[in-house]
Image (cartoon, helix red, strand yellow):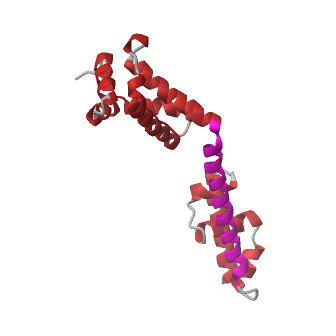
Amino acid sequence: MSSRPDELDVALTACASGDRAALRLIFDREAGRLVAIAERIVRRRELAEEVVQEAFIRIWTHAHQYAPERGSARGWIYAIVRNRAINMLRDGRREHTVEEVETLRETEQADEIMAAWHRLDRESRLRDCLGALDETKRHGILMAYVGGYSHGEIAGRLRIPLGTAKSWIRRGLSALRECMA
């Protein structure tokens, strides 16, 4: 079966009558393209999926408002998705909330990592050896071994090239071994 606009017209009319199978047909035929369109607008996959979910709720509850003489069913459906995506951008609160949560989580993790270093016994040889390292190298080692971060994650968080992060950690570990010996 092809996804001709007349099939979408019939499906929207069926949705207006409460036919869930018709909504499923619209979803199966159009959801992938709708998510792609929404993602181009909101620039994040998870937000685009949320836009499409909200759009399908609107399609279901407002299918009775579709008028074939005013435009194609596909155009009506895509306009709903586009408008939902633009409204999400205008609202902005969701996107900021996600960013704020990620920032808060990273701050808490960074605090935990540094707290682990500060919890080491003041007379500990490991604490002395870690303290002798450059702060950035010490932080990288703690991120790797206390926080469980990969080299790539450390490079991203410290805003340094991956090779630099690997080198710092390798040199830092070598210095720790020498110091602890």
Side (left or right) of 18 relative to 91: left
Side (left or right) of 131 relative to 153: right
User: Which residue does the image show at 64% across and 40% down from the upper left?
Assistant: 92
User: Which residue does the image show at 69% across and 73% down from the upper left?
Assistant: 175
Q: Give the range drawn in magenta.
A: 91-120
In the current view of this chain or complex, which residue is farthest to the left? 1
Quadrant of the image occupied by residue 35: top left
Q: Is residue 92 above or below residue 103?
A: above
Quadrant of the image occupied by residue 173: bottom right
Which quadrant is home to the N terminus? top left
**Is residue 77 highlighted in magenta?**
no
Residue 11 percent coordinates (x, y): 30, 25
In the current view of this chain or complex, which residue is farthest to the top? 69
Side (left or right) of 25 relative to 44: left
Residue 84 percent coordinates (x, y): 53, 32
Question: Which one is nearer the viewer's eye here, 170 or 128?
Answer: 128
Q: In this view, does 181 lie above or below 32?
A: below
Question: Which one is nearer the viewer's eye here, 123 or 8?
Answer: 8
Quadrant of the image occupied by residue 115: bottom right
**Is residue 113 highlighted in magenta?**
yes
Magenta span main SS: helix
Numbered label tally: 0
Which quadrant is home to the C terminus? bottom right
Residue 163 percent coordinates (x, y): 62, 53
In the current view of this chain or complex, which residue is farthest to the bottom? 123
Q: In this view, does 6 lie above or below 119?
A: above
User: Which residue does the image show at 43% across and 30% down from the upper left?
Assistant: 34
